[in-house]
Image (cartoon, rainbow, N blue to C red):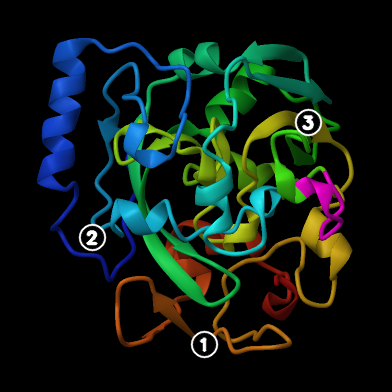
Amino acid sequence: MLIRSAPDLKDCDVTDHRLYLRLREFIAAGAALGAGLSAGAAQASPLPHSPNKMPIDEKPTPLKDITSYNNFYEFGTDKGDPAANAGAFRTRPWTVTVDGECAKPGHYGIDDIIKAYPLEERIYRMRCVEAWSMVIPWIGFPLASLIKQAQPNANAKYVAFQTLYDPSQMPGQKDHVLDWPYREGLRLDEALNPLTLLAVGLYGETLPNQDGAPIRLVVPWKYGFKGAKSIVRISFVRSQPKTTWSTMAPSEYGFYANVNPEVDHPRWSQATERRIGEFFRRKTLPFNGYGDQVASLYRGLDPRKLY
């Protein structure tokens, strides 16, 4: 499956040379998947088999920035809180429930999920609704693969995601800053789009706790809050599911959350963004640069309502 790059991307820096060497080492060693992280990204375990690299070319944000500058309110509301507070988070054992309007519901262990699908490296832009951005080399598999295995029926119009609720491990859940557990959702056709990814790693290693371990959603043409982290349930439903931010602040965070530089957040402009690691701001691209692959999903809808 070929995932096309956005028009402005260059044929360079596909994978950092050090990452390439690490991947070769992982293949040679035949390393088994570890039991998760115990103290942050530096101790991440290699994935059990080498991912296929996809031809998406943009220089990735450094690993230290990806793992130290995060929104993951389950571990605190400051950008450094997830890295500081998620080190002891236990990601094994871990079960993902698939249910709702489908022929093959079930409960699946995370290691079985990882082994079931060929892994791919996808270098995607990530645009936060707060007007900062990164480029992240995710490791994962298309959500469409899991959907096809579950066989949703004709009543399934949306896919709902629920993340873990465990205040004993996630100190941020002891506060009522959000209505826990965190919930997100997609239309079924959005979920089936080839760009939509379930990520289990980044930079060739298992997903760091602070970035949503052991499995998270990545939808690169939408603002980052759509990327549900630490997923425990995927449900096929008939009606548009309630999602955390669009329920808490519907005038600021909509269900669609498509990146649109022409529609400002009520409290700031979305026309430009601050790429982490760069000095100057850059223009934000419609659909985060993936419009040629996703704009057709929204024909006939008012683009100003797709926030």
Residue type at tag 2:
Lys
Q: Residues within 10 Å of mark 2 (few under 14, many from 20)?
A: many
- Give the x, y percent position of residue 221: 52, 61
The magenta span reads 173-180
Tell which of 307 and 33 is nearer to you.
33
Look at the magenta stretch and give its main secondary structure.
loop
Q: Dot 3 corresponds to which residue?
A: 235
Residue type at tag 1:
Ala
Q: Residues within 10 Å of mark 1 (few under 14, many from 20)?
A: some
Pick whichever of labels 2 and 1 is earlier in the sequence. 2
Pick whichever of labels 3 and 1 is earlier in the sequence. 3
Q: Residue at x 46, y 29 (%)?
A: 37
- Give the x, y percent position of residue 121: 32, 38
Pick whichever of labels 2 and 3 is earlier in the sequence. 2
Mark 2 to mark 3 CA distance (whole Å): 35 Å
Residue type at tag 3:
Ser
Q: Residues within 10 Å of mark 3 (few under 14, many from 20)?
A: many
Mark 2 to mark 1 CA distance (whole Å): 22 Å
Q: Residue at x 18, y 46 (%)?
A: 15
Instruction: Describe residue 262's horizontal placement relative to residue 97 as left or right.
Output: left
Q: Residue at x 34, y 11 (%)?
A: 32
Q: Is residue 146 above or below residue 273?
A: above
- Give the x, y percent position of residue 6: 34, 63
In terms of secondary structure, where does tag 3 sit? strand
